[in-house]
Image (cartoon, rainbow, N blue to C red):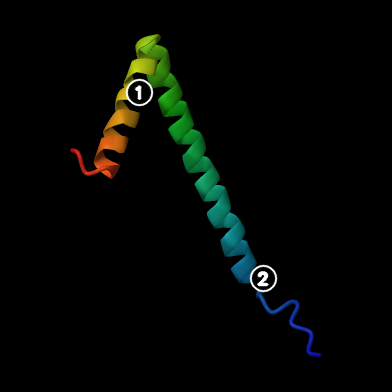
Amino acid sequence: MADTRGELEVETLLKIVLGLIAVLLVLEIVQAILGSIAGLLGPFFIVVQLAIAVLIVLWLLDRL
């Protein structure tokens, strides 16, 4: 039985880790932007979320 461990190069693993860190940073930025928008809208943010959810459901059902 051949041992197949360790076939990935170090550079490949570093690229994967850096890609995951980049995705995490983008998600943090998006969360900060959405948080500030939610703070500005206050109680109306729930209505906006519901409207977006309804539009997505209607689009998925081909009603839009």
Q: For the residue carrying disc 1, how many other residues have a C-alpha within 10 Å: few (<14), some (14-19), or many (20+)?
A: few
Name above or below for residue 61 compared with residue 41.
Answer: below
Q: Amino acid at mark 1?
A: Leu
Q: Total of numbered circles in the picture?
A: 2
In the image as oriented, which residue stretches furthest toward the right? 1
Given residues 55 and 11, the one toward you in this image is: 55
In the image as oriented, which residue stretches furthest toward the bottom? 1
Given residues 14 and 49, the one toward you in this image is: 49
**Residue 15: image tag:** none
Q: Position of residue 14 (x, y in %)?
A: 62, 63
Q: Nearer the viewer, mark 2 or mark 1?
A: 1
Q: Is residue 41 left or right of residue 5?
A: left
Residue at 27% over, 42% down: 61
Residue at 79% over, 84% down: 3
Q: Position of residue 33 (x, y in %)?
A: 41, 27
Which residue bears the numbered disc 2? 10
Q: Could you tell me if the residues under marks 2 and 1 are in contact, i.e. CB atoms within 8 Å?
A: no
Q: Amino acid at mark 2?
A: Val
Asked which quadrant contains residue 18, the reply is bottom right
Badge 2 marks a residue whose secondary structure is helix
Q: Is residue 27 left or right of residue 49?
A: right
Where is the N terminus found, in terms of image quarters? bottom right
In the image as oriented, which residue stretches furthest toward the left? 64
Residue at 34% over, 30% down: 53
Q: For the residue carrying disc 2, how many other residues have a C-alpha within 10 Å: few (<14), some (14-19), or many (20+)?
A: few
Which residue bears the numbered disc 1? 50
Q: Position of residue 39 (x, y in %)?
A: 42, 14
Q: Position of residue 10 (x, y in %)?
A: 67, 70
Work out how far the residue at label 2 is from the one at label 1, CA to CA, in angstroms: 46 Å
Residue at 22% over, 44% down: 62
Where is the C terminus found, in terms of image quarters? top left
Badge 1 marks a residue whose secondary structure is helix
